[in-house]
Image (cartoon, helix red, strand yellow):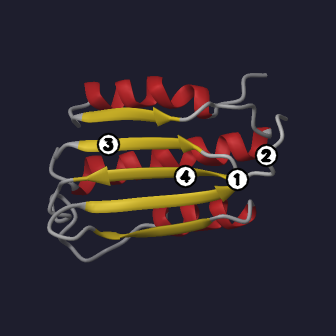
């Protein structure tokens, strides 16, 4: 069985780029093996955040930053859009709630909201115990 996870983020970014969103991926630190559930949760957060950027950022430049740190993993999805393209009807889906639930399941923290100046940010911190798994 193939488990989708962090290793599938690069191909995801490529597919989203081919769909029209100018998106880049930056990986910082030394990747390590992660439990399957956490690995999938990270992928799904990136997937949902990029879907939202496609819908609402007006094809603005977007960056995915995956930072492997000693005690935690930090994930940022940052776009430079105005937040209104295609989504100005005031209705919101369950994407942010789903991301919050996934992150909370692993003891993490999620912040999502407008950036200062322009754009939208999704930031996630997921604790790691420092061991290779």
Question: For mark 4, what is the residue?
Answer: 74
* Image label count: 4
Residue at mark 2 to residue at mark 3: CA–CA distance: 26 Å
Question: For mark 3, what is the residue?
Answer: 63
Residue at mark 4 to residue at mark 1: CA–CA distance: 10 Å
Q: Are marks 2 and 1 in contact (CB under 8 Å)?
A: yes
* Crowdedness near tag 2: few (<14), some (14–19) or many (≥20) residues, C-alpha within 10 Å: few
Q: Are marks 4 and 2 in contact (CB under 8 Å)?
A: no
Name the one closer to the observer, 128 or 95: 128
What residue is rendered at 50% in x and 41% in y? 66
Provide residue 13's location: percent of width, then percent of height.
39, 31
Residue at mark 1 to residue at mark 3: CA–CA distance: 23 Å
* Crowdedness near tag 4: few (<14), some (14–19) or many (≥20) residues, C-alpha within 10 Å: many
Question: For mark 1, what is the residue?
Answer: 71
Q: Quadrant of residue 19?
A: top left
Q: Is residue 65 left or right of residue 40?
A: left
């Amino acid at each position: 069985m193939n488990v989708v996870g962090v290793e599938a983020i690069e191909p995801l970014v490529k597919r989203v780029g081919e769909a029209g969103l100018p998106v880049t991926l930056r990986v910082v630190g030394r990747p390590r093996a992660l439990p399957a559930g956490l690995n999938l949760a990270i992928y799904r957060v990136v997937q949902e955040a990029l879907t939202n950027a496609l819908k609402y950022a007006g094809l603005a430049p977007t960056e995915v930053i995956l930072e492997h740190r000693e005690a935690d993993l930090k994930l940022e999805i940052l776009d430079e859009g105005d937040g209104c393209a295609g989504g100005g009807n005031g209705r919101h889906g369950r994407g942010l709630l789903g991301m919050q639930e996934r992150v909370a399941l692993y003891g993490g923290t999620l912040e999502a909201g407008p950036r200062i100046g322009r754009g939208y940010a999704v930031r996630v911190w997921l604790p790691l115990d420092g061991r290779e798994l």
